[in-house]
Image: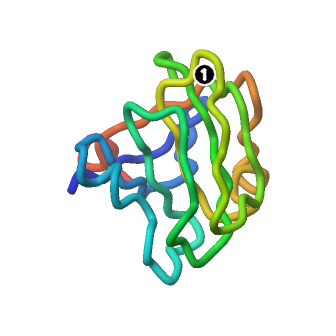
Amino acid sequence: MTILKLVKNGEVLSDYIEDASSFFRRFMGLMYRKSIPENHGLLLTPCNEIHTFGMRFDIDTVTLSKDNVVLHIDRCVKPNKIRKRVEGGYRVLELNSDMAEKLSINVGDTLEFIPAEKISS
């Protein structure tokens, strides 16, 4: 599994984003997990539509363009819901509920995802 760091304006927002760019990783997503640590997340690529069936906790979903510009944020998505497609969406970042706000992620921001070993802490 590849781990990415989430960076905005040169600042590391999270040092543990799971890269879900394979079919199996996207298929499993966060299903059946009891939780994830507060500052962790999952990046689904390519992806523009998610569901929360089989999930046990609320999440924030951040839809990004191919250039990693934030197009839409759905906050506090409950289990057993379907989130609609977002025009121009190419990937979805799933975070714990309320983390998008805590990390100051806003529509229009450009995010970077860098392999964890390429950034020194």
* Residue farthest along the bottom direction in this orientation: 34
Q: In the rendered view, does 59 fall on the left or right side of 42?
A: right
Residue 17 percent across, percent down from the top left: 42, 53
Q: Residue at x 21, y 57 (%)?
A: 1
Quarter of the rendering containing residue 29:
bottom left
| Amino acid beneath label 1 | Val
Residue located 45% across and 34% down the image: 47
The residue sitting at 72% across, 58% down in the picture is 77
Which residue is at 42% across, 47% downward?
Answer: 5
Depicted 26 relative to depicted 109: above or below: below
Q: In the figure, 65 relative to 84: above or below?
A: above
Question: In the shown orientation, is residue 120 left or right of residue 74?
Answer: left
Q: Report the coloring of the rendering.
A: rainbow
Local SS, label 1: loop
Disc 1 target residue: 69
Count of numbered labels shown in the rendering = 1
